Image (cartoon, rainbow, N blue to C red):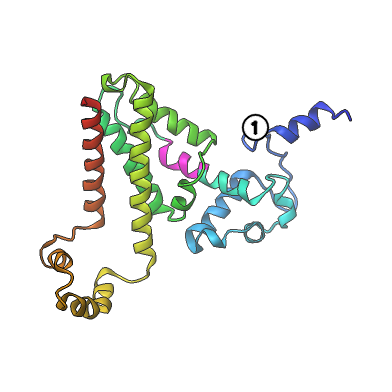
Amino acid sequence: MNIPPERAAKKTATLWERPEPATRPAPSPLSREKIVGAAIAIADMDGLEAVSLRKVGASLEARPMRLYTYLSTKEELLDLMVDAVFGETYGETTSLPSAQSDWRDALRAFAHRTRQACRKHPWFIELLAGRPHLGPNALAHLETTLAHLKDVPEFDDIDAVMRALSTVKAYTVGAIQCETSELKSGSTKAQWQEAWWPYLERRIATGRFPMLARVIRDASHPSLDAVFDEGLETVLAGIETRLKG
């Protein structure tokens, strides 16, 4: 069976390669940008699980089937949402460290911008930890980050660049996931302590948890910001040690 070239191209083209349908003024104008904006607004307010093509269509006064002319599946919608946040968060490269600056600054910028994006869009971390993201904004972000490391003597091997970036990403994603879980719990640190302290006090009184008692008594219990920064610096110090070894 011979498939016309135009149909074959449409069938094999990825989301990022398919042209957007022509704008139709009635009953209301739509675009991928509007659809993604509506989906992000829903996710920001009610969480990622609240996003559906039906709800997105309702917010735009459009039937769900009409949305399928702009994307094929909900997975494509999620991909578009992720790439929109990449563009929003990493779009301005002028504020990134220069290529001649300390390599740690480039990796710090990567970590902190990712964390800022997840603070603004808490659902973002749920999609960030999965498969590689290949949208134009995600690829531009990756290219920019790699370019800021390419002329650093310690990273003359591209594998060393990828190991360092992957290590920082793994730490950043893991730390943000822990933070997000804590923030999602719905209770403040003081409320949690008030609810659980009597139980912990009874367990410590048994004498079976001397290290836990020391943690409660002597540890500084810093803020989430301080914990994140200290962990990041520990990771960077480890990368530096490996590079010198």
Residues 154 and 144: in front is 154
Q: Main SS of the magenta segment? A: helix
Instruction: Classify residue 143 by image quadrant.
Output: top left
Q: For the N terminus, which image quadrant? A: top right
Residue at (72%, 49%) from the top-left corner? 68
Q: For the C terminus, which image quadrant? A: top left
Magenta span includes 36: no
Q: Left of 118 or right of it: where is 45?
A: right
Residues 77 and 231: in front is 231
Residues 219 and 214: in front is 214
Residue at (50%, 39%) from the top-left corner? 132
Q: Secondary structure at mark 1?
A: loop
Q: Is residue 115 above or below residue 100?
A: below
Magenta span includes 87: yes
Residue 65: % across, % down: 74, 54
Residue at (15%, 78%) from the top-left corner? 205
The residue indicated by pointer 1 is 17
Residue at (75%, 50%) from the top-left corner? 26
Q: Is residue 216 above or below residue 19?
A: below
Q: Is residue 193 above or below residue 76?
A: below
Instruction: Classify residue 170 by image quadrant.
Output: top left
Residue 81: % across, % down: 54, 47
> Visible in this render: residue 116?
no
Q: Which residues are magenta?
A: 83-91
Q: Is residue 100 above or below residue 31?
A: above
